[in-house]
Image (spheres, grey):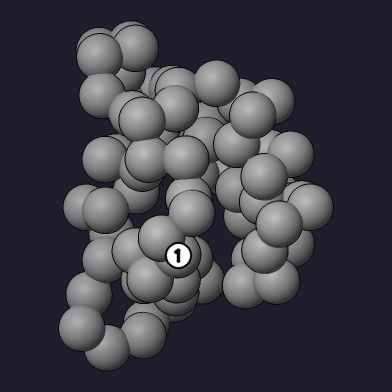
Amino acid sequence: MEKSFYHFLMKFRQHSAGDDITQFANNAYQDHSFPKYSSDYHELSNYLELQTDYLPTVSLFDQVWDLYVESENK
């Protein structure tokens, strides 16, 4: 994968909170410990499950991860 998951996620960031993906992106942007250069599913999943409280469900990460993989495979 060429770009990190964080870089992909930032395209959903907006100044006002919208849907769940926008809120996820906004919160990740504010999280200075987020693994910004990672493209590893397990590293990111573990971080989000164990180190954060802003992700409403793990399935949201899975949904965005699928979008990320799809965009990187084009």
Among the 4 quarters of the image, the one containing residue 38:
top left
In the image, farthest residue toward the right: 50
Quadrant in which the N terminus is drawn: top left
Q: Is residue 4 above or below residue 11?
A: above
Please state if 9 lies on the left or on the right of 15 as rendered.
right
Residue 21 shows in the view: no
Badge count? 1
Residue sitting at x 48%, y 50%:
34
Q: Is residue 41 above or below residue 52?
A: above
- Which residue is under mark 1? 31
In the image, farthest residue toward the bottom: 16
Residue sitting at x 60%, y 48%:
61
Which one is in front, 28 or 62? Answer: 28
Residue sitting at x 52%, y 31%:
66
Residue sitting at x 67%, y 51%:
48
Q: Residues within 10 Å of mark 1 (few under 14, many from 20)?
A: few
Residue 9 shows in the view: yes
Quadrant in which the C terminus is drawn: top left
Please state if 3 lies on the left or on the right of 66 as rendered.
left
Which one is in front, 35 or 45? Answer: 35
Which percent across, then down, holds residue 14?
22, 75
Q: Amino acid at mark 1?
A: Asp
Give the secondary structure at mark 1.
loop
Please state if 33 lies on the left or on the right of 41 as rendered.
left
Please state if 62 lies on the left or on the right of 5 as rendered.
right
Which percent across, then down, holds residue 3?
26, 24
Which percent across, then down, holds residue 17?
36, 85
